[in-house]
Structures are given as C-alpha cells and as structure tokens.
Image: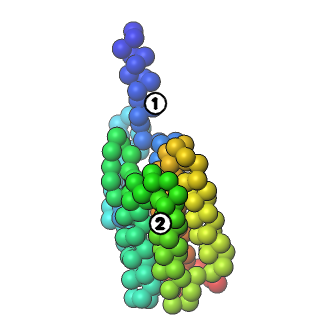
Amino acid sequence: MSHFVIKWVANRLLKDNQLNKFGVEDPYYEETLIGYAHDGKPKYKRVVRKVPEGISEHDAKVLNKVRKQAYRYDMWFSALGMRFGLSSVVGLVPAVGSIIIMHWSLSLFLNARRLDDGLPLDIQLLFLFNILVDFLLLLIPIVGDLIEVGYKANLRNFLLLEKHLTRIGQKSAGLISA
C-alpha cells in the first residue's frame, strides 16, 4: 500500500505541470498537440520555433539576437530538472552580480528597441517591469536567488517581443486589423 502512496505523491510532485514550469517557455522550441493517448492524456511534440511570418529581415535578426541572449542568461544549463543560465550563476555573487545582471537585461532591452518601427511604450514598460522585479529579487540574499531561477525575466521579455512581432506579421499579412 505504501508503494502506491509514494508513487502517487511522486507523480504529483515530479510531473510536468504549470506549477513547476514557472510560466516560461523555451525560446527555441514550442510544444504542439499531436493527439491523445489511449488513456485520454494529451500528447505533445517539441518543434522548433519559427520566426513570425510577415516581419522584415531586420526584425527577424533582432528577434534571433534577443532569443540567443535570453537563452544564455536564463536557460543555458540544466541541473536537477531545472533550467538556469548565466544570470542565475552570476547572481550568487553579492551586489556585483546584481549589477552585472541588470546590465545584461538592459542590453537585451536595448537590442529589442532596435526594431524597424521601434518597440511600443506598453511593451517597453513591461520589459522594464520584468527587469526591475528581477533586480529586486536578487537583492534578497539567498531566497531571492532561488526565486530568480524560476522568474526568468529575460525569457519573459523575449516572449513579449515575439508576441509583438507575431502581431506585426499578422497585420502586414492582413490577417488582423490595426
């Protein structure tokens, strides 16, 4: 009987779900639904994320550069089932680490602003909010470093940029109205 209880608890705690994904997706891959298993559970397949159609070549280069930076800063390494990046490692250094990470995040923000039509103010404010939350988390000695591993501000900012460029591509293709 105890075997079944342990198995049930392990499945609940270790199964991939929204609680342990921290709401951040992989910048290089996305999961697409391919069907359902015989027990009714959905089956997903990881496919390479494509550059949104309908955007300029310059915007695609900016998106790829921001993607690469965000991946390095937030997901470059994997240990114990968690993905973390350079910002998590550098964040362990008191004070100096926080300043370096702030510099990296602001450089990613400046790269994102190099779009052909610029970055709208509301998205810029969301970028800066994510950077500020990340910085404030790093000011909390040990607990902040652990929470920062899950927050992944740079990946959140990349996903904001990708969503914005997807809307731009849809507008240029005439799929949605301005």
Question: In terms of depth relative to the viewer, which is nearer, 154 or 12?
Answer: 154
Let me know if residue 47 appears in the view: yes
**x, y percent for residue 132:** 61, 63
User: Which x, y percent locates residue 158?
Assistant: 48, 68
Task: Return the residue at label 1.
Answer: 12
What residue is shown with label 2? Answer: 100
- Which residue corresponds to the image point at 36% horizontal and 42% vertical from the top-left? 81
Where does residue 100 sit, x and y in percent of width and height?
A: 47, 66
Placement of 118 over or under 125, stated as above or below: below
For image coordinates 54% across by 43% down, the residue present is 143
99 is higher (above) or lower (below) than 17: below
Query: Number of marks in the image?
Result: 2
The residue positioned 48% from the left and 74% from the top of the image is: 108
Q: Label 1 to label 2, Cα distance in Å?
A: 37 Å
Type of amino acid under label 1: Arg
Indicate left or right for 38 with 12 as reference. Answer: left
Query: Badge 1 local density, few (<14 within 10 Å), some, or many (20+)?
Result: few
